[in-house]
Amino acid sequence: MKYAWILFIFSFLIGQTKAQDSLVIRRIYDEALLRGQAYENLRQLCKDIGPRLSGSAQAQMAVDWSYEKMRAYQFDKVTKQEITVPHWERGTTETAWYKSVNQYAPVRKLHLLALGGSIGTNGLLEAEIIEFETMAELKNAKAKEVEGKIVFLNQPMDAAQIQTFKAYGACYAIRGNGAVEAGKLGAKAVVIRSLGLPIDEHPHTGSMHYEKDIPKIPAAALATKDADALSTALQAGKVRFYLEMDCREFPDATSYNVMAEIKGSIHPEQIITIGGHLDSWDTGEGAHDDGAGVIHCLEALRIIQTLGIKPTHTIRVVFFMNEENGNQGGQQYAKWCLANGEKQIAAMESDRGGFAPRGFGLDGPDQYLGMLQSFEPMLRSYDLHVFEKGYGGVDIGPLKEQYPGIPLFGFVPDSQRYFDYHHAPSDVFESVNKRELELGAAAIASFVYLLDKNL
Amino acid sequence: MKYAWILFIFSFLIGQTKAQDSLVIRRIYDEALLRGQAYENLRQLCKDIGPRLSGSAQAQMAVDWSYEKMRAYQFDKVTKQEITVPHWERGTTETAWYKSVNQYAPVRKLHLLALGGSIGTNGLLEAEIIEFETMAELKNAKAKEVEGKIVFLNQPMDAAQIQTFKAYGACYAIRGNGAVEAGKLGAKAVVIRSLGLPIDEHPHTGSMHYEKDIPKIPAAALATKDADALSTALQAGKVRFYLEMDCREFPDATSYNVMAEIKGSIHPEQIITIGGHLDSWDTGEGAHDDGAGVIHCLEALRIIQTLGIKPTHTIRVVFFMNEENGNQGGQQYAKWCLANGEKQIAAMESDRGGFAPRGFGLDGPDQYLGMLQSFEPMLRSYDLHVFEKGYGGVDIGPLKEQYPGIPLFGFVPDSQRYFDYHHAPSDVFESVNKRELELGAAAIASFVYLLDKNL
């Protein structure tokens, strides 16, 4: 009987807490949707500054903008962390076309972007082009087939994959390793089919790498529509490919992670890191990738502060630099935290675009899965339904090495439109829907509120 | 022991069936995403024909297009059902502006659309305009305050509502009944704030009505941005409003529901109706509302046929006419089914746009809820998570009267962007994402497959 009473009181208290949590979450959503600043902040980042590749003047403007914005919000502490980043520039010439025996369309100028990190062509490069449908096919090729030619890697993303990030992952190698594999076989350059789902005229850039002792060759991505046209031309006979790019690497540059925090009321020494990356590719405006992510997190911190929520632990927002081509921001942040004796207890990243929220994934020990799933009843009416194992994020990833066992969480918006825009000139402010962006910020603020209470 | 064996075999058979269902659903998604025809069909409907208001020449083109398209797909039976529909036309003049004592912006030309069914102004109408924030406020007003003036109903949709259709429902009365309530008080016209969520320059039209013995007055919707500007002008002092519209009603016209079916292999006499509405407002291209819905259902039937799925019951796709301003298609269809002795056993409608699918709602007896929820495990990996009580649709609604107890289902896509486009000039083909549309068709085909097996 006595135990029954204890149980009753306990249940009552839990009920009270849940009711209180629900009220706080409702206030978070009201603030985001009725008095939100996310959309205007994203507009400034995309339109007043624009694309923000590491080492560029615009990346520095974005650092300054972020720092001033965080200070204007009067967070407890606003700092910049100096880091060293690569500095690559696209240059001013980027032209490609082909000539084919196809009588219907004998010459076609192509929509193409150099891959980030590629060397230039040193004038016009001209060669026969040879197509491979997969990376495996290229690896099985003989050097004499490839030598002196341009390699065309035409592996399409699998549209049948419901989770578009899986389709992206399956093609990642043609962009990341294409130049190495083609270089090994003596190719003069490598041209890949863009890692994008629609068939359109937007090429998608992204990172690539070279390896020691393998000849460096220029690497570029073709718009999917052009890749299809080139493939058709190759079915008709030999195709000469013309490529001129003057992109190049510069000496490493100094840049910054930018961060702000709200001090924990009970455990200020224990830190929950949330963030996204401030840098972007140099085409488009980095609106979904990852303007939306940094603005989500900034807005979440603003909402928490504005509503007078006093988190138990310190909540720190980090705008990471250099996720796109080196991840120096993420790596140096994790090391710096440990070197400073900081206690990092959890981290969350938003780097999947500003689309309608679906939920959160856990990248960490199973013991945190129950906690994550316990959030669902309070967030279900906000259309959040993904509470499962998943991926955290590139920027927060290195925290795992420095803090073994730390739970990392990734914000999961709807993924269906992401690869329409990813790394493409179309990733501009106009491609982000105001309401979807605001719902993302509210979902993240609510998640951080619950995470702080349950850790 | 004996029972244990029976249980084992039973479980095994259920397991086999589920595994088989999963394979069929996977094939449905592959067909929709890899060889889909939905996007091209929607392009034709939006671009080759355009908006399709009941009674218009374009509505007739759409009927012909649908009938020929269904015949080209060689469905078992393709028919048109003759119905009578209202015929209203916007005319060629639709101009509005205001003059205000506001020195900063003394005159503003407005983005405005007559509401469907409104009378014209019979030349330029000019009067002082008076603002009400809600319908309730207008109802409480005295005739002498309103008489001879233009009523401005400036009730915004509540952006804090997560389910945007609820925010729409809460404002519906200002559009549907504004002319009646303002007319009762002697107003010369009524102008409403558009039922749209973004603050932009797209006015949103939609249906309104008049009542017997209450003076008919012109009714129109202002773009939200203009509504805000007008409200600001009214804070500065009196505002004169100028309105000229030559929209008018014509005699009723003949039109058609268009339908096609795949005969049931076991119960051909039992019919599952799926559909959307072919008509649209006369602005934009009716892409989300409801081009997407009819194309979803057409594509679902095509996929079922293409994959050689033999449904047990007859699956009938209906492109309903006149959902927007009269629902004659839905009403006459339900009566016609009963009069023909048809056995309608379930219906599903898609009329919430072509966005990423979330699931299905049940409008019908609770006994069907368990069945609906039993679909979830097979559809969860396709990002479908809504399997609950909900709303069916306007077109299939009248089946409830003729077939008491019939379960109606509504397709539920993500609702966040719907009221950016609903009834506005921006509801064009380009606002529909190819992949989201295809996923909708696949979700509906999968749902129909499961529904047919479980009824």
Image (tube, coloured by chain):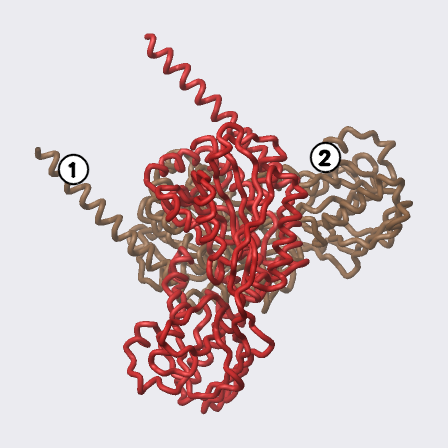
Chain colours: A brown, B red
Query: At x 51% / y 39%, what residue is drawn?
Result: B382
Identify the residue position indicated by label 2 in the image: A135
Q: Which mark is residue A7?
A: 1
Horizontal side of residue B242 vs B298, given as left or right: left
- Which residue occupies the foreground of this view, A288 or B146? B146
Residue A58 screen position, x and y as percent? 62, 64
Rendered position, A364 above or below B235:
above
Same subunit, labels 1 and 2: the answer reads yes
- Which residue occupies the foreground of this view, B378 or A239? B378
Query: At x 12% / y 35%, what residue is drawn?
Result: A4
- Which residue occupies the foreground of this view, A265 or B274? B274
Q: Which mark is residue A353?
A: none
Q: Is residue A74 visible?
A: no
Quadrant in the rendering for residue A345: top left
Indicate the amino acid at tag 2: Met
Residue B406 screen position, x and y as percent? 39, 42
Which image quadrant: the C terminus of chain A?
A: top left
CA separation in Å, label 1 and label 2? 61 Å
Query: At x 57% / y 36%, what residue is drawn?
Result: B262
- Which residue occupies the foreground of this view, B404 or A111? B404
Residue B68 screen position, x and y as percent? 66, 48
Which chain does the numbered disc 2 sit on? A
Q: Is residue B409 visible?
A: yes
Horizontal side of residue B248 vs B400, given as left or right: right
Quadrant in the rendering for residue B189: bottom left
Farthest residue to the left: give it. Answer: A1
Farthest residue to the top: give it. Answer: B1
